[in-house]
Image: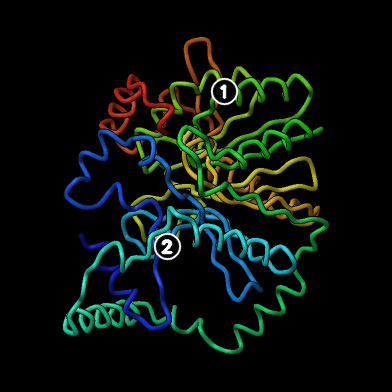
Amino acid sequence: CIRDRTYAALDTHPSLEVRVYNAIGTRGTGRMANFVYHKGSLNHRMHNKIFLADSAVAVLGGRNIGDDYFGRSKKRNFVDTDLLLSGPIVPELSAGFDVYWNSGWAVPSDALLQLELTNLELRAVRERIDERLAEHPELTSLVVTDRLKTLAADLVAAHPLQDAQPVVDDPDVAWGKRPDEVADTLTELAEGAERRILIVSPYLVLTPPLLELGRAMSQKGVDVRVITNSLASNDVVIAHAAYARYRGTNLDTGTELYEFRGDPEITRDDVAEDVSLHSKYILFDDDTVFLGSLNLDPRSLYLNTELGVILKSPSLVEALTAEFEQLTNGENAWRVVRRDDGFEWRSAAGEVQRQPAKSGWQRFRGWLLMFLPLSSQM
């Protein structure tokens, strides 16, 4: 497949090495049989996202590598939030990367694929890369010494951290065991909150324990506010359908619920046809933030492996709170409220009684998919 040949091309570079996590089950002549008979291991997906340089700086958050995650797609772009970190936490994150790199689940691409690309094929790859870069001169202009100096100065003047802890799921999960280190840590943080919890999660399918936790927090007087994608902004309709089944249950816990608009003001200059929220972070009271790869859904909590950081920094929480307030204002999101006969969506665009969607067909698909019992796989 094209992806395999891309991995093989990257691996030919003397300074690049590629390993593929949990790859055996999805390749080769027996791939369909693996889908049927080894669903458990196939679901063990690495969802971690991190970029490390010399164990000195790290970039992490929810962003994948692709045009649509860097505002370069004409079809759909994603709104993301990243952190650039330096200091003692970076070697710890680097050690976490090494655990995955050396895991038995990680297979060197040359051993897995056994593809030998010809010089002609490799030349074609280089030509495609050069063509893409020529289309975006603003990208190559970023790689200049002055910009690196500015970046170093920004790090020195960045938000100070009172405490910083990495949270990394174990890659070597035994059969039947859940990679739930991140889930357990977030539960402890939520139970310790005293004033507020602000949640940004592009996919939101709350499990019964999380719903009970939300109800307990509201009863305790903790202000819980959540923003997720609306049907209009969600790139995975079936995931939204799983969320919509429990929209009322979410509200009944006392949670304040927002859905990202399909036409948010913050992306009005975007060239893409569609836009989705993809940021993933949780703010606890006024001093603690969790930011990483985790969505609040069963797949992230119990099937995928995930990675994140817990940072204690009042100034960072203040900055992210301002971002949360921007995401949830009426120009960018719908406030969802209960009505006697259903729900109402309120924003600067007005009030509607049917969930916002790109089209009637999308709304019908969302309604139809709500009847599928697939919430545990979302």
Residue 232 percent across, percent down from the top left: 39, 38
Residue 245 percent across, percent down from the top left: 44, 21
What's the amino acid at mark 2?
Ile
Q: Which mark is residue 327?
A: none
> As displayed, is residue 120 above or below residue 201?
below
> As displayed, is residue 370 above or below residue 102?
above
User: CB atoms at circles 1 and 2 under 8 Å apart?
Assistant: no
Q: Residue at x 81, y 52 (%)?
A: 314
User: In this rendering, which labeled residue sits more in front, label 1 or label 2?
Assistant: 2
The picture quadrant where one finds residue 335 is top right
Q: In this orientation, which residue lies closer to the viewer: 274 or 7? A: 7
| Element class at badge 2 | loop
Residue beneath disc 2: 65
Q: Residue at x 40, y 64 (%)?
A: 19
Residue beneath disc 1: 250
Residue 281 percent across, percent down from the top left: 62, 46
Q: Around disc 1, counting alpha carbons within 10 Å, would you say few (fewer than 14), some (14 to 19), or many (20 or more)?
A: many
Q: Residue at x 25, y 78 (%)?
A: 125
Q: In this orientation, which residue lies closer to the viewer: 352 or 116? A: 116
Q: CA distance from mark 1 to mark 2?
A: 32 Å
| Element class at badge 1 | helix
Q: Residue at x 33, y 74 (%)?
A: 10
Q: Is residue 347 visible?
A: no
